Image (cartoon, helix red, strand yellow):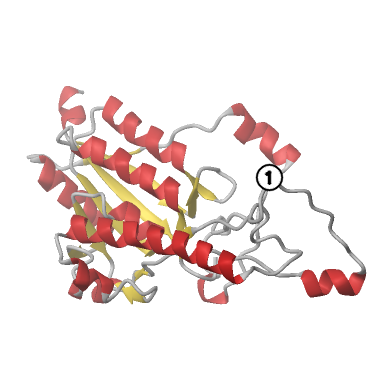
Amino acid sequence: MFRRAKNRIALIKVEGVISDSDSYGTDRARIVASLKEAERRKARGIVLRVNSPGGTVAACQEIFAAVERVKAKSIPVVASMGDIAASGGVYVSMAASEILASPGTVTGSIGVIIKGNDLSALYNRVGVSPKVIKSGAHKDMMATYRSLSPEEQALLQGVIDDSHDQFVETVAGARKRPRNEIEQIADGRILTGRQAHASGLVDSLGGLDAAVDRAAELAGLKQKPRLVVIEVHKSLWQRILRPILGGSQVGFPAPLFSRLSSQYTAPPYPIPMWIMPGF
């Protein structure tokens, strides 16, 4: 039994849109708890299987920091990119000791986006007249009942630019590349795994099995690794009450990725996101 424990490699799945809520895919708290559980089980290494189009900025940053804390305890972490590991999925992967992707993985999409709808013309047509009392001129920015002012456009662009700067800075630091090299591919473009490897975003090409073997090698295992899937159990609310009372879900219409899980959904409210458009 002791020998079996010594060659343990933990597998943690990062699937769907990353946020602070489990309504949209990957709950940030679940990933952080899974990393702690891997430590508790004395895993010698960890494989993050990333299958995500991205997510909210802060949630991705907190997962990144949690992976960094694990690595600081001399536990190697290997990111294994699946079907899609784009935008925030790239950011989370950057925290790993090494990154592997399949040649056909859809990755890249380094950038920030915030989306909203101006429905003021529709409201006027159907006779809806919103009444708003607010504390400041910009408190209702991105509201559907009015357009953005030029000043608000500039304010939001500043938020987007700062978030993008943080993204590029992190990728450049993680990959040990000059910032200007990363900026050349940080315009929102998507890349295949093979293109990402050629541009230095990933270390090597390979699937999940290769990632497990690499984690075992980095951990210095002499025996065949024993893979342990880490699944933190959902709370009573998540397992019983949420399906009964309902939760926010937004449809996922993009036909290109229709084969992917229905959990690829994004929050319905306007918020800066590191996410691939179409989600």
**Camera-nearest residue between 35 and 9:** 35
Q: Residue at x 22, y 54 (%)?
A: 211
Q: Is residue 82 visible?
A: yes
* Mark 1 burial class by Cα count in 10 Å: few <14, some 14-19, many 20+: few
| Location of residue 228 with respect to 160 vertically, above or below | above
Quadrant of res 194? bottom left
Measured from the top left, where is residue 26 in percent x and y? Answer: 48, 47
**Amino acid residing under circle 1:** Gly
72 relative position to 47: left or right: left
125 relative position to 205: left or right: right
**Camera-nearest residue between 219 and 119:** 119
Q: Is residue 260 visible?
A: no
Q: Quadrant of the N terminus?
A: top left
Q: Residue at x 61, y 35 (%)?
A: 238
Measured from the top left, where is residue 178 in percent x and y? Answer: 15, 66
Q: Quadrant of the C terminus?
A: bottom right
Measured from the top left, where is residue 250 in percent x and y? Answer: 65, 58
- Tag 1 residue: 247
Measured from the top left, where is residue 85 in percent x and y? Answer: 37, 62
Q: Of all residues shown, which one is farthest toward the right?
A: 127
Q: Of all residues shown, which one is farthest toward the top?
A: 2
Q: Residue at x 40, y 32 (%)?
A: 33
